[in-house]
Amino acid sequence: MKAEYLETVRLDLKPLDSSFLSQDYVDWMNDTEVNKYLESGGDYTLEKLSNFLKQVESNPILFWAIVIKDSQKHIGNIKIDPISHRNRVGEYGILIGDKEEWGKGYAKEASQMVIDFCFSDKVDLRKITLGVVSENIDAIQLYMKLGFIQEGLLKIHAIHEGKWCDVMRMAAFNPKLKVESK
């Protein structure tokens, strides 16, 4: 399934494609503050980003550009990928790359729209999962506001700022479904 256009009060969520190639986007990916908690970043060029966007375009994945409606300014991306269709589970990821737009609630607004879309009959996911470095308190607080709960903790799992750290696994469940564990 490919991403389709979604909108909120303040945001357009547009399928991510090559039209979003820009030096600003490259700059986000090379900004150590922006990519502090990302697994990728730090060595991007226009060519590398162009290749990445072509790959996104050619695959059936749910990947959106987050665009401010009034200005049509691209401020970040959000995705649900990979998706296990058999298990109806998708992995969530978000980046607000434009630091001028941090703290304005755009991450929550975009995330809620994507979560609602993924739990709708159109996508019909049962569960959305994510991994977050346990030191990323702001992100964890956002995810909890969005209805994610901690499912587990992967001890000394990832390198962050030169040291090993824990990664929290979190999940949100489709509210239409009764969740039972055995």
Image (spheres, rainbow, N blue to C red):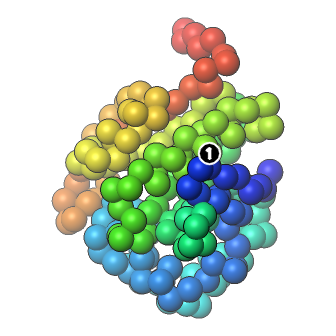
Question: Which residue does the image show at 46% across and 52% down from the upper left?
Answer: 107
In the displayed structure, would residue 138 be above or below residue 99?
Answer: above
In the displayed structure, would residue 154 be above or below residue 180?
Answer: below
Q: Is residue 90 in view?
A: yes
Callout 1 secondary element: helix
In the displayed structure, would residue 68 be above or below residue 172?
Answer: below
Quarter of the view holding residue 16: bottom right
Q: Which residue is mark 1?
A: 114
Residue 65 position in % (x across, y down) = 61, 65
Question: Which residue does the image show at 61% across and 20% down from the upper left?
Answer: 175
In the displayed structure, would residue 64 be above or below residue 126?
Answer: below
Residue 147 position in % (x across, y down) = 46, 29
Q: How would you rate the neighbour count of disc 1 (Cα within 10 Å): few for under 14, some for 14-19, many for 20 or more?
A: many
Count of labels in the image: 1
- 53 or 160: nearer the viewer: 53
Question: Which residue does the image show at 62% across and 25% down from the upper left?
Answer: 174
Left or right: 4 with respect to 38?
right
Residue 57 position in % (x across, y down) = 75, 70
Q: What is the quadrant of the C terminus in the image?
A: top right
- Mark 1: which amino acid? Val
Question: Which residue does the image show at 50% across and 88% down from the upper left?
Answer: 23
Which residue appears farthest toward the left when viewing the image?
163
Left or right: 47 with respect to 130?
right
Q: Is residue 89 in view?
A: no
